[in-house]
Image: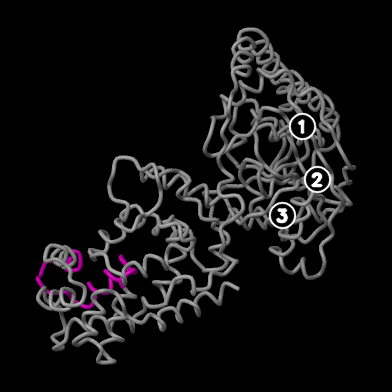
């Protein structure tokens, strides 16, 4: 059966935007000359003014939050402290004005706290996204707890009475949702809460998956679209690309930087959306994506974590991008499981100094399994290679392990495979047993059989136990299909004469194999 006959569900198709976490800044000769001149003229003056205005804003913000009891911190700022807000707002707006953000173009109207307790801003792409929070009245934000410890900015963050997220606290997510819900249902006593539902910075080419925390309260929200329509994009700050300081300096070296804010109509959730935060989040995201004219993808912050893991393993950062939310919801894989797959992917690639290309070739696949090239092995390789490119990227590898290997890699199949090698029911497998089957069936060399035996026999006893066999099946689940197919042929008494020759050349019937792949694929619809 040819690979083209194997259905590929659109639900796991490659996303329109492959990598929303990379930004490349292409400077023309004109740009370089402008930056060079302004770096010794305008930019230093702007930087001094920015720091001066921050220093002026700090004491007013510090006074507004000083001498408050723990009980007072659970209430919105009132009284004389509230009178300091206009002063802090003017000075903070002056910070951005001094940096070249002279005006903010707006469309639509901001709703009141009673109409929409939550303001959802997207896409989140820059450190300059702090300007919309100032423009919206320096209202509350959802921020990392460590933000409060930053010099100058920490005090200004406290002044906004943020909802703090402590990522190291396992209960932080629940506590954050409860606090958002408490404030959202206060009847307008608390200021609006600004949330960037994407949870991390992107390059604005799409809207990635929205975190559901903002949607659990089930209250009306106002989507707010943020745009930076500049000729040269010096504001985007992503996981892979120019650093924050470089982007900040390049921005100071522009004559001006434009920003646009568009308020969309308040979105009131239906009863179905109140019961299903994911549905609520996806519907709001669709509205915002339509306004921005960009597609939506299922990338998340976990993709960024996998990018970091890939870099540590000397793989290109973009190797770790798998559109995690989609794989999690469709295949049920956890972050830890995908992280384990990445380590296995690295093992297949080998221990080279630094990989420039993050795809597994047919040669590498063959070497990893210690199997000679054959039509049978090529068929397995093609099942992993979903786009027919001739290589397997990490996303295809994760999907392949779930749809191709996992259905066969169960206790029953492993036990059958063990019994296949232990033909005389000794309770263990010797190297002679392994050689008899593998060399006869796949024409594997003595050296490769020896390597497989050493990897299987972790106790170095000379005898492979069932537990060792199971552990190896988990380590290299790709073998599961090979074991299953061989057992099927043995049960059908096909492993003799001409059929043996055909099997060694990989000309076996894979109909049952493909049928199981199809059954696994159905759950993705």
In the depicted structure, whether residue 107 falls above or below residue 462: above
**Dot 1 lies on which element?**
strand
Crowdedness of circle 2 by 10 Å Cα count: few (<14), some, many (20+)? Answer: many
Residue located at (61% from left, 44% from top): 200
Label located before the other in sequence (3 or 2): 2
43 relative to 449, above or below:
above
- Residue 462 forms part of the magenta stretch: yes
Upstream in sequence: badge 1 or badge 3: 3
Percent across and percent down for residue 13 are 57, 62
Q: Nearer the viewer, residue 379 or 282?
A: 379
Q: Determine which residue is flagged by label 1.
A: 259
Give the labeled residue for mark 3: 214
Residue drawn at x 72%, y 46% as measured from the top left = 195
Position of 211 with respect to 450 (left or right) is right
Q: Decide whether residue 98 is among the magenta residues.
A: no
Q: Are marks 2 and 1 in contact (CB under 8 Å)?
A: no
Identify the residue at the far front of this view: 498
Instruction: Give the magenta part as a residue range.
Output: 455-479
Residue 250 figure quarter: top right
């Amino acid at each position: 059966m040819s690979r083209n006959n194997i259905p590929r569900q659109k639900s796991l198709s490659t996303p329109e935007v492959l990598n929303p976490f990379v930004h490349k800044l292409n400077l023309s000769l004109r740009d370089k000359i402008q930056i060079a001149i302004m770096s010794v003229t305008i930019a230093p003056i702007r930087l001094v003014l920015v720091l001066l205005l921050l220093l002026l804003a700090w004491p007013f913000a510090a006074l507004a939050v000083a001498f408050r009891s723990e009980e007072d911190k659970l209430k919105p700022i009132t009284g004389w402290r509230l009178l300091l807000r206009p002063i802090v707002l003017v000075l903070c707006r002056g910070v951005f004005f001094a940096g070249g953000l002279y005006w903010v173009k707006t469309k639509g109207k901001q709703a009141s706290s009673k109409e929409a307790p939550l303001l959802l801003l997207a896409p989140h792409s820059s450190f300059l996204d702090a300007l919309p929070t100032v423009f919206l009245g320096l209202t509350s934000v959802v921020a990392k707890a460590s933000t409060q410890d930053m010099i100058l900015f920490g005090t200004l963050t406290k002044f906004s009475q943020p909802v703090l997220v402590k990522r190291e606290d396992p209960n932080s997510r629940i506590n954050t949702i409860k606090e958002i819900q408490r404030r959202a249902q206060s009847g307008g006593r608390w200021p609006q809460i600004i949330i960037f539902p994407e949870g991390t910075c992107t390059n604005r080419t799409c809207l990635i998956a929205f975190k559901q925390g903002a949607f659990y309260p089930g209250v009306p929200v106002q989507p707010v679209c943020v745009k930076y329509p500049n000729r040269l994009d010096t504001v985007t700050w992503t996981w892979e690309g120019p650093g924050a300081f470089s982007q900040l300096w390049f921005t100071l070296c522009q004559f001006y930087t434009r920003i646009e804010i568009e308020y969309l109509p308040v979105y009131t959730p239906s009863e179905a959306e109140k019961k299903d935060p994911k549905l609520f989040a996806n519907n709001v995201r669709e509205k915002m994506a339509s306004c921005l004219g960009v597609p939506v993808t299922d990338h998340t912050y976990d993709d960024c974590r996998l990018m970091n893991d890939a870099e540590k393993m000397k793989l290109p950062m973009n190797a770790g991008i798998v559109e995690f939310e989609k794989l999690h919801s469709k295949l049920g894989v956890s972050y830890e499981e995908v992280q384990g797959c990445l380590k296995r992917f690295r093992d297949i690639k080998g221990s080279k100094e630094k990989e420039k290309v993050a795809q597994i070739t047919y040669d590498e696949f063959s070497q990893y399994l210690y199997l000679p090239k054959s039509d049978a092995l090529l068929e397995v390789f093609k099942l992993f290679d979903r786009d027919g490119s001739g290589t397997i990227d990490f996303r295809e590898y994760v999907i392949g392990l779930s749809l191709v290997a996992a259905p066969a890699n169960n206790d029953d199949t492993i036990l059958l495979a063990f019994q296949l090698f232990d033909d005389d029911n000794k309770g263990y497998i010797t190297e002679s047993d392994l050689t008899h089957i593998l060399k006869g069936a796949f024409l594997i060399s003595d050296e490769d059989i020896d390597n497989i035996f050493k990897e299987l026999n972790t106790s170095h006893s000379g005898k492979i136990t069932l537990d060792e066999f199971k552990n190896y099946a988990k380590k290299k689940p790709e073998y599961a299909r090979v074991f299953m197919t061989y057992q099927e042929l043995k049960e059908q008494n096909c492993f003799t004469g001409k059929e043996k020759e055909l099997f060694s050349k990989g000309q076996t019937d894979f109909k049952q194999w493909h049928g199981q792949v199809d059954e696994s694929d159905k759950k993705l619809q």
